[in-house]
Image (cartoon, rainbow, N blue to C red):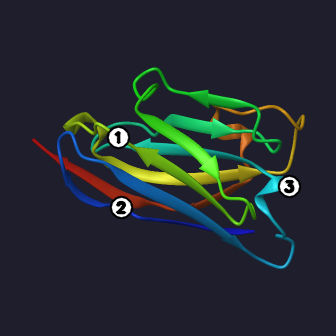
């Protein structure tokens, strides 16, 4: 499974962006087979968890720093997983990565990097003050 994150860019503080994660590969059918997570890595910092969604989509988890501002979701066909980011601030500046795993309980969302099997290339989000 290959993942590709897109949608990053430059935005002013208070603005919004939507990131998308698409998957491909011989074994990939839809994201209903995978729990998906978004992580980010700011300059000079370690990568951190942002949001996660279970295979069932009923299990959701958010970092405290983004709760109420960011939303992880998938479309009806479960072909992409989006991260909608509102009220962005400069501290949200980072490279954002999507990750997926086919392991674990159907309703579980994961916050740890080690729980994910597949990772995409990141997309850069820059928030100007």
Quarter of the picture containing the C terminus is top left
Judging by the rendered image, the residue that carries numbered circle 2 is: 8
Nearest the viewer among 53 and 116 is: 53
Q: In what element is the residue under mark 2?
A: loop
Q: In what element is the residue under mark 1?
A: loop
Question: Which marked residue is nearer to the observer: mark 3 or mark 1?
Answer: 1
Q: In this view, does 8 lie to the left or right of 83?
A: left
Q: Residue furthest left?
A: 129
Q: Which residue lies furthest to the front in this view?
A: 76
Q: Distance between the residues labelled 1 and 2?
A: 13 Å
Q: How far apart are marks 3 and 1 (CA)?
A: 28 Å
Residue 123, percent across and down? 41, 61
Neighbour tally class for label 2: few under 14, some 14-19, many 20 plus, Cα within 10 Å: some
Q: In which quarter of the image is residue 91?
A: top left
Judging by the rendered image, the residue that carries numbered circle 3 is: 33
Residue 125, percent across and down? 31, 54
Q: Name which of mark 3 and mark 2 comes first in the sequence.
A: 2
**Residue 128 higher or lower than 49, as above or below:** below
Judging by the rendered image, the residue that carries numbered circle 1 is: 86
């Amino acid at each position: 499974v290959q993942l590709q994150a897109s949608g990053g860019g430059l935005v002013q503080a208070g603005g919004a962006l939507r990131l998308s994660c698409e998957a491909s590969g011989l074994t990939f059918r839809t994201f209903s087979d995978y729990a998906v997570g978004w992580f980010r890595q700011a300059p000079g910092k370690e990568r951190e968890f942002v949001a996660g969604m279970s295979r069932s989509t009923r299990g959701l988890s958010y970092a405290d720093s983004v709760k109420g501002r960011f939303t992880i979701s998938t479309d009806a066909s479960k072909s992409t997983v989006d991260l909608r980011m509102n009220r962005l601030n400069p501290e949200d500046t980072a490279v954002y990565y999507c990750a997926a795993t086919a392991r674990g309980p159907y309703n579980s969302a994961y916050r740890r990097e080690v729980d994910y099997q597949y990772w995409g290339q990141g997309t850069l989000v820059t928030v100007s003050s």
